[in-house]
């Protein structure tokens, strides 16, 4: 009887933590959805499509260095910490190794970025924008989101992001009044990320007794080797998301980038509704998968079915009212983005399926190499299609290319996930699967 009551208590405690984390991340994602809907229309109206396109172009460029400094640690770090959630000493080791690796990557990335910016005229003309934008890379590098996700303490992520994002969003409205103020956008973004990062390190030291110490190159190398497949996969994803924008900017200019980015950012904002689900489930399912693969996969399949239905309904609604949505949010002058939005609105569903089959199943099964293979093949195909379609159809071609690639990735993740699930089912589905 006592044992049964203990099991019930443990189940209650586990699901309470999961629900709490979901609520916190939902609040954060709601903020990430609402703030762009407030700031993007304002920036487009004040700065114009041309400067908005410039900022989007610079963001696409700088994102490469964010991928380098993240190095897939948001997945591998979360997974590793969640496996030693009751061992503070092990957590300290993982934290120090990953943070040391990230800081090394920040330094190397800054050197590389500076060299590229001053070597090519397309970047050199607005060099300040790129240098200011790099501040956000530093801020994100020192903010250990992966650690908080691993220990399932999402409230810290939410509180820090909530305060800093609101403050610096208000600053955008106060200080950006004319087109010449465009450079202030990356300045405020950088200040927001750096502030959140500094405060997060303070909380880690105060509440969790996590203290940073620079690690040896040998330890750093071990972490880099461990995360290489996820990093390369993330880099390949960046190649078809951000390279598409860069190619469009080079071929068609900032004006075309402005229309494309307005539609894409709106579609991705809607797609990011699944992020709280994904980020909350990942550490939880990682631990559950190590205990019972079969039952964990059954849970994932149910979540996938319900999520796919919800996103399908959202897509139909957004497609039918695309023109009204664009005009209300961006204004009548952005009507050229309507057709792009109708195409790109498929992103939420495809991203959700990609996350469930790829991140939640393949990565939690330790099949990082399969995850990488899907992204690699899709990226190679994307680059070829993108150059052709963007050259002839400008931003419309870029939008079509992006959706084709997302479809291929979702199908690839589904294929390999299904193969792994079938293998698990054949073996019996319990703890014997290693």
Image (spheres, helix red, strand yellow):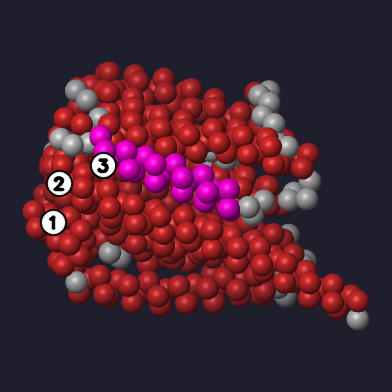
Residue on which the image places disc 3: 173
Q: Residue at 19% of width from left, 72% of height from top?
A: 321
Q: Where 113 falls versus 207 (above or below)? A: above
297 on left or right of 344:
right
Farthest front residue in view: 174
Q: Where 126 falls versus 70 (above or below)? A: above
In the rendered image, which quarter is residue 336 located in? bottom left
50 on left or right of 192:
left
Tag 1 and tag 3, C-beta contact below 8 Å: no
Callout 3 crowding tier (Cα within 10 Å): few <14, some 14–19, many ≥20: few
Q: Looking at the image, is mark 3 or mark 2 earlier in the sequence?
A: 2
Look at discs 3 and 2 and give the one toward the viewer: 3
- Residue 173 magenta: yes
Give the CA separation, mark 3 to mark 2. Answer: 12 Å
Residue 309 visible in the picture = yes
Residue stretch in magenta = 154-175
Look at discs 1 and 3 and give the one toward the viewer: 3
Which SS does the magenta portion mostly show?
helix
Residue on which the image places disc 2: 45
> Which quadrant is home to the C terminus?
bottom right
Disc 2 on helix, strand or loop?
Answer: helix
> Which quadrant is home to the N terminus?
bottom right
- Find residue 331 and name its label: 1
Callout 1 crowding tier (Cα within 10 Å): few <14, some 14–19, many ≥20: some
Q: Residue at 61% of width from left, 28% of height from top?
A: 100
- The location of residue 224, given as percent across then percent down, is 59, 34
Q: Nearer the viewer, residue 31 or 109?
A: 31
Q: Nearer the viewer, residue 197 or 49?
A: 197
Residue 381 visible in the picture = no
Tag 1 and tag 2, C-beta contact below 8 Å: yes
Callout 2 crowding tier (Cα within 10 Å): few <14, some 14–19, many ≥20: some
């Amino acid at each position: 009887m006592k044992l049964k009551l203990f099991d019930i208590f443990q189940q209650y405690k586990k699901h309470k933590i999961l629900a709490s984390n979901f609520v916190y991340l939902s609040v954060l994602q709601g903020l990430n959805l609402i703030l762009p809907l407030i700031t993007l229309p304002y920036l487009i109206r004040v700065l114009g499509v041309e400067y908005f396109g410039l900022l989007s172009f610079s963001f696409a460029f700088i994102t490469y260095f964010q991928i380098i400094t993240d190095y897939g640690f948001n997945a591998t770090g979360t997974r590793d910490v969640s496996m030693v959630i009751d061992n503070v000493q092990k957590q300290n080791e993982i934290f120090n190794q990953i943070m040391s690796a990230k800081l090394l990557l920040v330094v190397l990335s800054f050197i590389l970025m500076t060299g590229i910016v001053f070597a090519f005229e397309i970047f050199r003309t607005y060099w300040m924008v790129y240098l200011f934008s790099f501040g956000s890379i530093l801020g994100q590098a020192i903010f250990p989101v992966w650690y908080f996700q691993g220990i399932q303490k999402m409230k810290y992520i939410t509180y820090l992001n909530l305060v800093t994002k609101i403050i610096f969003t208000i600053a955008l409205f106060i200080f950006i009044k004319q087109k010449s103020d465009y450079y202030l956008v990356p300045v405020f973004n950088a200040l927001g990320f750096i502030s959140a990062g500094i405060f997060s390190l303070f909380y880690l030291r105060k509440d969790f007794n996590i203290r940073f110490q620079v690690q040896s190159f040998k330890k750093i190398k071990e972490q880099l080797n461990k995360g290489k497949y996820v990093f390369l996969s993330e880099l390949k994803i960046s190649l078809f998301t951000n390279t598409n924008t860069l190619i469009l900017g080079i071929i068609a200019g900032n004006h075309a980038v402005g229309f494309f980015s307005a539609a894409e950012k709106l579609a991705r904002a809607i797609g990011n509704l699944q992020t709280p689900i994904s980020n909350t489930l990942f550490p939880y399912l990682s631990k559950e998968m190590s205990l019972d693969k079969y039952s964990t996969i059954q849970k994932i399949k149910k979540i996938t079915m319900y999520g796919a239905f919800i996103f399908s309904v959202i897509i139909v609604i957004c497609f039918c009212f695309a023109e009204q949505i664009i005009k209300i949010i961006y204004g009548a002058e952005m009507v050229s983005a309507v057709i792009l939005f109708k195409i790109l609105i498929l992103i939420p569903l495809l991203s959700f399926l990609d996350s469930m089959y790829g991140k939640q199943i393949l990565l939690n099964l330790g099949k990082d190499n399969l995850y990488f293979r899907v992204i690699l093949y899709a990226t190679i195909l994307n680059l070829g299609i993108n150059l052709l379609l963007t050259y002839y159809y400008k931003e419309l071609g870029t939008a079509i290319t992006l959706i084709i690639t997302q479809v291929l990735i979702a199908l690839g993740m589904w294929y390999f996930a299904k193969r792994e699930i079938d293998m698990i089912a054949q073996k019996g589905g319990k703890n014997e699967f290693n």
